[in-house]
Image (tube, helix red, strand yellow):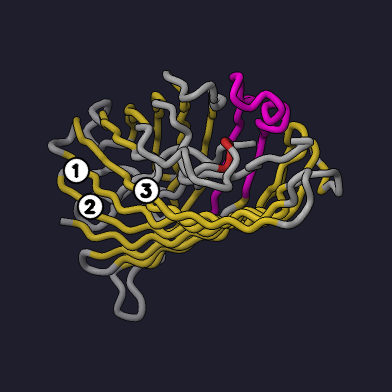
Amino acid sequence: MKFSKKYFFAALLLFVLSSKEVLACACGCGVFTVGTSSILPNCEGGTAFLQYDYMNQSRNWHKTDNSSGHNHDKRINTQTITAGMQYMFNRDWGAAIRVPYMTRYVQNLPHSGGMTYNRHSAVGDIRINGIYSGFSSDMSSGLIFGLKLPTGDTNSNGFERNTQIGTGSTDSILGAYKVGKIDIAGKFNYFLQGTWEHPLTIHRGYHPGDEISGATGIYYNAGSHFGLKKIAPIMQFMGSKKTQDTGWASPSHNANSGYTQIFFAPAIEFSFTQFKLYTDVEFPVYRNVNGNQLAPQNLYKLILSYNF
């Protein structure tokens, strides 16, 4: 897989924190960033990027149904701007950092009655990854490992423990990827990815569940058009499975956390000389949640990167 010199950063991981009678930060308090053919290293050098994600959770789900069941959360709207950088020191080793800044709006109907509206903006949980790509000379397969740090705010007034911007936990991150050609000319290519995030510590009795995320897809190098170096349409599927939260801090919420979701995410990438622009829309094709949780209909992503 040949991208313009250097590589392009990766988003790995996560789609969500979950979440009484039933509440739930639901299927999507985080940002689904596993996926896309552009996130994997293929040569030495660095990339800086800005990523924008939008998620609007407004529909209550129970198991596989868009349910009208009781959920005192009525809407959770999250916008995230992530600044990040990845650097490959050589063809074997690299490192990456992602720093999200999140704005979250929560509308709910407490048991005491009277609709409440709360809004908060803060830095989220920072992720630091190491990368090993030395299994082959073309860097077509590798491992990703690192930590999610407890930098996100967990004390915002008016937010439930499971709708806070941060989880309060330190998590381990472990992932793997593989890319390859489908045709001899290299016009069609495929990619596979998977990551596992596991909380190593808990904060104030709140223990988020483990999460396994994966993505697979193909992309087509359509070549140079309209003054662009490359145009590449992408067809991909992304999936995430999260186990239930545990801990004494929110026992009534734990039953309304955890899920399995699969998204179809058509995308397109435009390559300039040193810049790349990527965008996708993620449509749910399967969803199975525990209890009652708010879930987003679609997810939206835009990434602008600069290779150096």
Disc on res. 47: 2
Residue 293 makes an appearance in the image: yes
SS at badge 2: strand
Q: CA distance from mark 3 to mark 2?
A: 21 Å
Q: Nearer the viewer, residue 158 or 283?
A: 158
Q: Nearer the viewer, mark 3 or mark 1?
A: 3
* Residue 80 placement, left or right of 68: left
The reply to whether discs 2 and 1 touch (Cβ–Cβ < 8 Å) is yes
Extent of the magenta region = 234-263
Please tell me which residue is depicted at 58% across the width and 56% down the height of the picture: 118
Q: Is residue 253 magenta?
A: yes
Q: Is residue 75 above or below residue 200?
A: below
Residue 211 in percent (x, y) is at: 54, 29
Q: Earlier in the sequence, mark 3 or mark 2?
A: 2
Q: Which residue is mark 3?
A: 123
For residue 293, which quarter of the picture?
top right
Residue 236 vs 139, above or below: the answer is below
Instruction: Using the image as rendered, state which of residue 106 and residue 114 is in the foreground.
Output: 114
The residue that mark 1 highlights is 87
Q: Residue at x 38, y 53 (%)?
A: 101
